[in-house]
Image: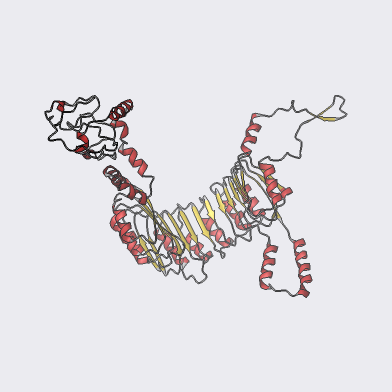
Amino acid sequence: MLHHPSVDSSTAAPKQAALPKKRGSYNCGRCGLPKKGHTCPSADGRPAPLVPRSGHGLRRALFSDEDRGSSALVPAPVDEEVAGTPVPEVVEEEEEEEDEVDWTEEAMILPTSCMVEVLKRLSPKELMRAAAVCRGWRGCVRRMWRSAEELRLSVSPRSQIGFVGSLLQKCSGLSRLTLRMESDVDATMLACVVFSLPNLEAFEINMTKNTVNRITGNELSRFVAEKRCLTTLKVEGCTNIGFLNISSSSLSTLWLSNLYCISKMVFKCPNLREISLDFARQENDSTDLVTMMENLGRSCPKLTNIHIASIQLCNEAVLALTSANLRCLRMLSLVLGSRITDAAVTSIVSCYTSLELLDLSGSSISDSGIRMLCKVLPETLSRLLLALCPNITSSGIQFAAVQLPLLQLIDCGMSISDTGYHYESSQEKLCPNIKRSGEYTMCQKLSTMKSQRIYQKLIIKHANLRKLSLWGCSGLDALYLNCPELNDLNLNSCTNLHPERLLLRCPNLKDIHASGCQDMLIGAIRNQVLNEFVAVENHLPCKRLADGSKRVQVPLFIQQISDGEKQKRRQMTHCIVHHV
């Protein structure tokens, strides 16, 4: 019990009403020392000397000095009148309760490295709110901004360019930046990036719907020239480029999408290894792809990956690319070129004999072109994409599966399609209003066409195939697969595939996509892959009697199932059928 000096009645203050209970300080109100195990020396009436606080003194938990910059709470100063009043008995009980808690200051302070790791998982807006909590958190946030290497920022329409600039200036060491623009963007954003991030290596601009990219070709070329450390550039919505002249010795990856009517394209990038040019799907596009291909082959000799998507692609453009003789080319993707025929395939296989990926989706190649590919690229080609190729049949796909042993991916979606169905839909569009008198004649024609339709069957047996895409192949009515490594099968919109003509011998299947298929087909897939139903066939071995007169089935307890068969049955249950 603390003893307090007696107060003279002449100098005593008038008696006040009892104050409400408040949580007092952990330190003595007279001498400033901690209350725990403390006897105040000022009890005899003499003022106690002020003891300077040092880092070696005892401290209570949740208390820290201002010079430490900790995020702990600092208790409020004690009122003089409250400090001078007698301490009630409740204080002793509080002290006794707190004596039971063995907390130390080291246990209450979170290390700065752990704090930075926690703050890294917050968004920029949340980080700004965290910086306003206290001085310690503000220092951690500032340290995290300085040490950040990658930033993905979504710029809303309400955000001003000044906000983005102030945010980027905090990340002077940033090397990778991705901006998701929800509003229009122009060259001001590029200038902000150039001024704030001197060591930027990868820059990407993604556009959302109803937003416009107003950056011109001269502004983009100037940006690439000023950023001498830039290695990766990806920009969407390049509809206002017009003219493009990119010159950089450090640039290795270039992606530009939505290109339209480019008058001239010049690339002077000796270290460029990957390029992707996606043009707008418009018939009046006046871009000269032949000249672009010639310049690309001369000025970028180290190209390994080329992706060009344009409806203006033709055999002449492919010949211009093959004349460059890019020896390092491994991936070639020429998409939506309906004027690309087997002649272009001949020039491709004559110059590039080390291709690992070939994408000719949307072209007009036939089974003869596939045979040429298989003849030249049997030891290197691992991914073949031939979607939207109407001249390809199931025979060509089967030939490729047999002749290309390293294949891991085959995509022939919408290639094996029902031509009669497209004819019917075109006739309905041309003559939507048929008179009542001609309905019977039209029905007769449709029934005759359905009877004359010739469906195809596909049989694939491959040891390394892992992904097969047959989406939209309405011309298939039979499918037989024996691929032990296959884990992804796409059968979306295979409307004419017969359930009784489906056989899947793929123990490692994980995902089967069957949206738009018949319910009976989905049930057959589940029956074969998931083993949800009892098999019709009885696989019990048979045995003859001693006289050889009759065959009987061996009982269940005699049949032995190997460990490998048990493991296969367990693996087959992990497959997921997507049919929504």
* Residue 174 image position (x, y, % from top left): 32, 50
For this view, does 451 lie left or right of residue 209?
right
Say which of 530 and 265 sits in front: 530
Q: Is residue 320 left or right of residue 455?
A: left
Q: Position of residue 8 (x, y in %)?
A: 13, 32
Any part of residue 489 in sight: yes
Residue 428 in the image: above or below residue 361: below
Give the image quarter of residue 186.
Answer: bottom left
**Figure coloring:** secondary structure
Identify the image quadrant of residue 71: top left
**Residue 73 percent location from the top left of the image:** 28, 39
Q: Is 31 placed left or right of 209 in the picture?
A: left
Find residue 464 and report its horizontal and vertical position in percent: 59, 43
Q: Is residue 122 above or below residue 555?
A: below
Task: Report whether residue 351 is seen.
Answer: no
Query: Would you say 398 lies left or right of 14 here?
Result: right
- Residue drawn 28% across and 53% down? 169
Q: Quadrant of the N terminus?
A: top left
